[in-house]
Amino acid sequence: MAKAKSTRKPGGQKGSKGTTLAKVDNPDEVIDLLIDRHTLPKGVNFKAAGYETRQEIGMTISHFVTEYRAEVLEDSQGHRFTATFPEALKRPVQ
């Protein structure tokens, strides 16, 4: 099924607060990109004039698993007694 055509113009709408990613002060990794000196004009002297920077923000997704083990005791007649799980844990995995 096709999406209904919108009457709005593309891009941010009037009154919408836009956001832009901001550079961080201390990136986790810095890679220096050097000019291939063979591509520069011959016979000209150059001096270092600083750097231009761009940052790429990547995300690492990980998970942290906590296993709860409810102790089970059994009496001499075979009746089992199990410790109580936390209230929020209703299923074996969630």
Image (cartoon, rainbow, N blue to C red):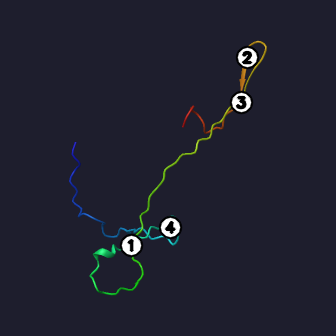
Camera-side mark, 1 or 2: 1
Of tags 1 and 3, the one toward the viewer is 1
Secondary element at image label 4: loop
Residue matched to label 1: 34
Q: Are marks 1 and 2 in contact (CB under 8 Å)?
A: no
Vertical arrangement, residue 82 with respect to residue 67, above or below: above
Q: Amino acid at mark 1?
A: Leu
Q: Tag 4: residue type?
A: Pro
Q: Name which of mark 4 and mark 1 comes first in the sequence.
A: 4
Give the residue number, with chain letter if any, for mark 2.
79
Disc 4 marks which residue?
27
Q: CA distance from mark 2 to mark 4?
A: 59 Å
Q: Nearer the viewer, residue 3 or 19?
A: 19
Mark toward the viewer: 2 or 4: 4
Element under disc 2: loop
Q: Please tell me how crowded label 4 is: few (under 14), some (14-19), or many (20+) other residues with Cα within 10 Å.
A: few
The residue pinned by badge 3 equals 83
Q: Residue at x 21, y 45 (%)?
A: 2
Residue 29 percent location from the top left of the image: 49, 65
**Residue lying furthest right:** 76
